Image (tube, coloured by chain):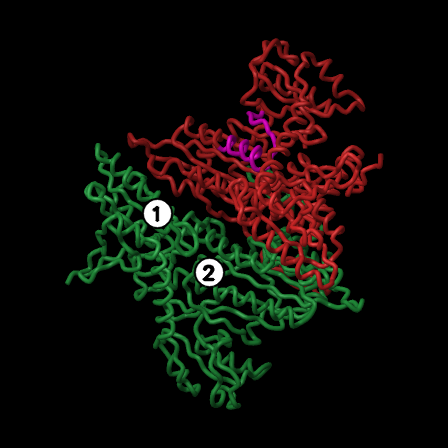
Chain colours: A green, B red
Amino acid sequence: MSQIRHALSVTRDADFAAWYQDVITEAEMAEESGVRGCMVIRPWGYGIWERIQKLMDERIKAAGVENCYFPLFIPLSFFAKEAAHVDGFAKEMAVVTHHRLIADGKGGLVPDPEAKLEEPLIVRPTSETVIGAAMSRWVQSWRDLPLLANQWANVVRWEMRTRMFLRTSEFLWQEGHTAHADRADAMIETLRALEMYRSFSEEALAMPVFAGEKPENERFPGAVATYSIEAMMQDGKALQAGTSHYLGTGFAEAAEIRYQDREGQQALCHTTSWGVSTRMIGGVIMTHGDDDGLRVPPAIAPQQIVILPMLREDDGDAALLAYCEELRAALVKQSALGEPLRVLLDKRPGKATQKRWAWVKKGVPLILEIGGRDAAGAMVSVLRRDRLWREDAKVNFAAQAREAFLAAAAAEIEDIQRSLHADATARRDANIERGVTSLAELEALFADEKRYPGWVELSWSRPGGAELEEVVAKLKALKLTIRNTPLDAAPATGTCLFTGQPAVERIFVARAY
Amino acid sequence: MSQIRHALSVTRDADFAAWYQDVITEAEMAEESGVRGCMVIRPWGYGIWERIQKLMDERIKAAGVENCYFPLFIPLSFFAKEAAHVDGFAKEMAVVTHHRLIADGKGGLVPDPEAKLEEPLIVRPTSETVIGAAMSRWVQSWRDLPLLANQWANVVRWEMRTRMFLRTSEFLWQEGHTAHADRADAMIETLRALEMYRSFSEEALAMPVFAGEKPENERFPGAVATYSIEAMMQDGKALQAGTSHYLGTGFAEAAEIRYQDREGQQALCHTTSWGVSTRMIGGVIMTHGDDDGLRVPPAIAPQQIVILPMLREDDGDAALLAYCEELRAALVKQSALGEPLRVLLDKRPGKATQKRWAWVKKGVPLILEIGGRDAAGAMVSVLRRDRLWREDAKVNFAAQAREAFLAAAAAEIEDIQRSLHADATARRDANIERGVTSLAELEALFADEKRYPGWVELSWSRPGGAELEEVVAKLKALKLTIRNTPLDAAPATGTCLFTGQPAVERIFVARAY
């Protein structure tokens, strides 16, 4: 039997990190920009982000949250206030100190010493402080609550080691910020956002996740509780793909977000914040990509179907193009996943085979190759990206009558969405070890060079403080971290393998990005 | 006859600048952020921007332009390269010099001297340089051309005197950047973008504009030709609301954007760039606002119809709300201007009159006030924002049967769009003086305290260089600038009133923002 000749030069098995970068390059999703830690997001990568934005924004708006825009720059003093009450304050940030360049007299430019800012400005790493200041102006009485705001924006966190989409100095995200009258209402919002992220990941990204609370040591600095969605990548590592924080009254106190309650008393608001970012695209790559490149779930695919006419630069091309254009027009009248089909007729010059492989690597769900004979015979040649290879290692094209294909196209697109989700869920569930009851067993699983490609779900006693720090240190020695306490876990059983105390809940332990 | 009691405390006549700011505050569009030159865009202002983005993005995509994302930061050296070949190089930019904060030992934070960047980074004022560098990687052969890219982004230009939406240090915009094989193709794209902006302004913003070429002295630094759309505000000043530049081969040379042509020869690309920004929102305010606040053209109104139930906090409220909800449901099934109607049922607590005036100031096109008796009698009480007052100075509510209103609602929305455009066009055209043939006449129009509230269209000889500088200086003494040479102007007549040479084209001269 012949060997499959994959489209990428690196396989997942050989070198997962190199494979990841290769997918991004070959699918033309992003590239190095020449600016430290910042990437250029190319049309295919940005198109996926636009789809994520659109579908997430609909959910955000449906929840009554209103979009706003807050400044890119935050005065240094805002952080000094925060630093005073937040221990884990992150200090790696881009600092603007000057507002003018002048010639250095040697043909170059330098920051003008005369244009030094009195107070440096920080490029926002997140906007709690500046949004809190606005909320303190906007909230007067209980009638103004809840206050539900969101922004789509770029943020900057100076990262020493960067990886495209997963950890870049500048990234794109949405950040929701809400203020509430009491703890109960704020907790409902925190969990609503978490559930929004969970269902979005499953439905739009076809990426199964566990939603749950992060342990104390992984909380957002200043938060009372931090929740996350955690996805398993194909190398068995966990990816935190979204977070939602209940911030208590601490941020409201720092920003003076107070309201008059129904009894006329002044009270502090309870606030929340929640966000997802371009990191999700990294999750999609490592969930659905294969050795031939990306596979994009149809819900977030910029194009769901690409039609490739096999042009021969002769008299037959006009009829072929007319046939393809008619096919495109018929397809875009159909809907799948609640929206009209997105179909591209790729008429660019170039060899059809070359173009086919470019689209395979980009992961477009369905590719149609149409030759002159197909056009004459009212046929189409269909390739499902998630079933790329036949058993005999040939490309799995299926010849179909045009009418039959048209009748089934929307269902086919929906089936690909479902199928990617089912495959990813089965893979994940097969890689969760639930039988670990002692630290020795855990150590054995991750010991030495043995690469256990999954997660461990175990019962623990939820220690805090110094006791938790000991647990974290033991896990760190195995390069493991606690991911979260899934909301839908089974009850805990037995004793905690770290503390020997009775177990109270289940957690996921894994290596992570 | 009683006097109209307007919703704003300042009128356009009394103080146009104060009125402008008052509209923004009272319509809750934006506010000061506490960060120098940066504003907070509130939900109503941002909602208008989202509408502008959506409608413009559709036009951009329809032209085959693909969205991407490029870094916020640009290395200083990129500008040094540009500064060397661009005379008018603007140097007021935000400069990032450090990437970490540390405690200053006095309870505050300072930039860490150990974390000084080797090369300062500039917060992008525009992205020609960094996009040019990407284009030089992406363009290899004639097959890669034209390369059509766009990004929606925030940019920063350090402004000493700022005014909300019109001139802020940070603003939001789209910037299109394209590369072409030759001058002809690049000029077609430059003019396509200009026409896109012109039709968008007229159709979406209901803001009449003249599209034309800017004079030599107003060109984007480094451009071969700069085109603009120019709108007349209600104080008679001009607002440049969008620009499109043909950049020749100069930028391609600096960024090394070369391609192999069909004959196998290396050639430089011809590039263009074009952009519109949140400034357009300032134009909408000063085109359509009145002494009662904003009037938003329906095409860009976040809500086109607001339903205000006159709740009495008694048993009748349930039936009233059910009636209003049914009305909303019936309306959103209808389409106007090619999209489903956007309708809000405003159930928030508060007095109906107070809420009515808040929506009047926000400029929502149609307001429906529904009381218990309306609900019982299948009636609605309708207020068109563009016909707010009756002749007797009362608010112009019209009682209509529910069915009659529903049958006409979509047409009414389209009529408001048309009507705002017609009013603005009539006002503009009435304020263009075309009979000026001498400098003395021009001086007389704008002399001293006399405030001529409009533009002058005149014929000139299109002088360049030093001769043009003289003209510009003469105009500057009258606080006037040359706006553009409208593409659709009548042929020039007579002699140039500046140079005495035979006139070759017509230009607009005006005071401007």
Q: Quadrant of the N terminus of chain B?
A: top right
Chain letter for mark 1, please. A
Marked residue nearer the N-terminal end (1 or 2): 2
Image-quadrant location for residue B424: top right
Instruction: Tell me the crowding category of disc 2: few under 14, some 14 to 19, or many 20 or more residues within 10 angstroms, Cα based.
Output: many
State the extent of the magenta-drawn residues as a range.
B193-214
For disc 2, the marked residue is: A280
Q: Secondary structure at mark 2?
A: helix
Q: Amino acid at mark 2?
A: Met
At x 35%, y 43%, the residue is A329
Q: Position of residue B46 (x, y in %)?
A: 62, 48
In this rendering, is residue A107 above or below B187?
Answer: below
Kindly report the distance in space between the C-alpha atoms of the residues bearing marks 1 and 2: 29 Å
> Hey, what amino acid is under mark 1?
Leu
Closer to the camera: disc 1 or disc 2?
1
Per the rendering, the mark at residue A388 is: none
User: Which of A483/B241 is in front?
Assistant: B241
Circle 1 residues within 10 Å: few <14, some 14–19, many ≥20: many
Q: Is residue B198 magenta?
A: yes
Toward the viewer: A1 or B5? B5
Residue B106 screen position, x and y as percent: 73, 64
Residue under numbered circle 1: A331
| Dot 2: chain letter | A
Give the x, y percent position of residue A324.
29, 41
Do marks 1 and 2 share a subunit?
yes
Look at the picture and state if B192 lies above or below A19: above
Query: x, y percentage for residue A461?
Result: 53, 85
Total marks drawn?
A: 2
Q: Residue at x 34, y 53 (%)?
A: A364
**Residue A256 in view:** no
From the viewer's perspective, is residue A499 above or below residue B147? below
